Image (tube, rainbow, N blue to C red):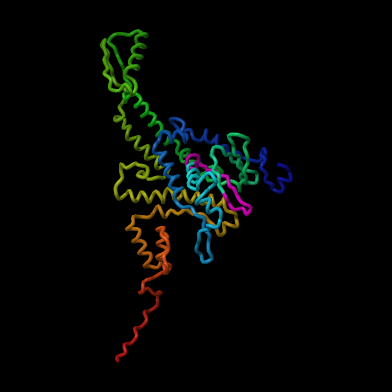
Amino acid sequence: MGILARLFGTETRAAGEGDVRLSDPYLGEFFGIQGRGGTVTPDAVLSNLAVAARCVALRSEMMASVGLYLYRRTENGGRERADDNPLYGVLHDIANPNMTAFEAREFLVRSLDLTGNAYARIERNARGQVTALYPLAPLSVGVERLASGRLRYRVSQERGAPYILLQEEMLHLRGPSRDGILGQSPISISRGSLGLALTNHDTASALSANSLRPSGILSFAERLTPEQRIQVRKSMEERYVGSDKAGKLMVMDGGAKFERMAFTPEDAEFLDSRKLGNEDVARIFGLPPTSVGITDKATYSNTEQEGRALVQNALGPLAGRIEAAMLRCLLTDVSRRFLYVEHDLDTLLRGDVKARFEAYRLGREIGAFSPNDIRRRENEPPIANGDVYHQPANWMPLGNTAPAAAPVVEA
């Protein structure tokens, strides 16, 4: 960076030496996701832990399925959908010519859960309004912090040289962060617990491959030569080791005796430890056990409560994180004064038909809802004269007295 650029703070796309702090996602993947019992990578976790795959799929699919709207604040303190802004269609309908809004949002949430960061290239029109979002593979993006404190993004390509995007050209969703630049995923934060779950999975796979037979000692009454030992071991492995040889009859002569050395999975409470590992994985992603198929302790009463906990404790904070990042990256300083982005999570909290309409009846009786308000919530068209609000006739402002009854005049 030259002297004039340092004085006036000119920002360029060229990479300068000594002016940036590079946060390489590949190095973070290598150094930050090493766990005990093996390498805890997103691919290893999703391939071997069905609960983790379900957690990631559930969070990304549910967040992509709920409505994401751009709202405009009105003068009377209310709000209305800003469907005349191009960003509304990008978030709700079509993200770019190749992806729907559902697919793009699912990809971003999935990247956020697996790597801690999600990126999308922003395309704007001449007025600075967002017209398209192009999600990028998170491991292909490196973040550079300039001397001014602003961020710049270096995007690697499979073919061709990498290119640079400025801060206004990138949507960056980040998880919990140590430096405020790169986020951490639940996998990297809880790699110790996930490493134990992967170790249990590998142990179960090894036992299954060995037909659930533990190791042991094959002893003979007489001393064997080294060649005989090798021959006996090879013969036993060829005939009796492997899941395809389970159930075969073992015949030994020459005074041979087999003694088991290791505990069985039941003796070591191995199955219980695997169940505990599945519950830990669900806790790592903030999901109730019943939502990912762990129904050991599920009852009719707590299943409904855990369904609400799924929205309030898992999806609610995730939605807030996404909305804040979109507010920072997609809207300008001026537009943020009257525009904002919000998910519609109420659709996930609605009860059954009876409970829902009981709530509607109560809301209409106290004047909170009109008939058309209720119909809009049920995705029904409005009706004529349906925007009238009512309140009980016996309600009056506090401190007022009821009007005196008119005197009865006898004819």
Q: In which quarter of the image is residue 211?
A: top left
Instruction: Judge whether residue 170 can be spotted in this image.
Output: yes
Segment colored magenta = 111-131
- Residue 354 falls left or right of residue 329: left
* Residue under the point 58% across and 34% down: 158
Residue 246, how many percent across, how many down? 30, 23
Most distant residue in the bottom direction? 411
Q: Nearer the viewer, residue 78 or 182?
A: 78
Which quarter of the image is occupied by the C terminus? bottom left
* Residue under the point 26% across and 18% down: 249
Residue 138, how many percent across, how many down? 53, 39
Q: Nearer the viewer, residue 243 or 203?
A: 243
Residue 322, how many percent across, how many down? 50, 49
Q: In this view, does 316 lie above or below 293?
A: below
Residue 245 among those drawn in magenta: no
Q: Is residue 23 above or below residue 66?
A: above
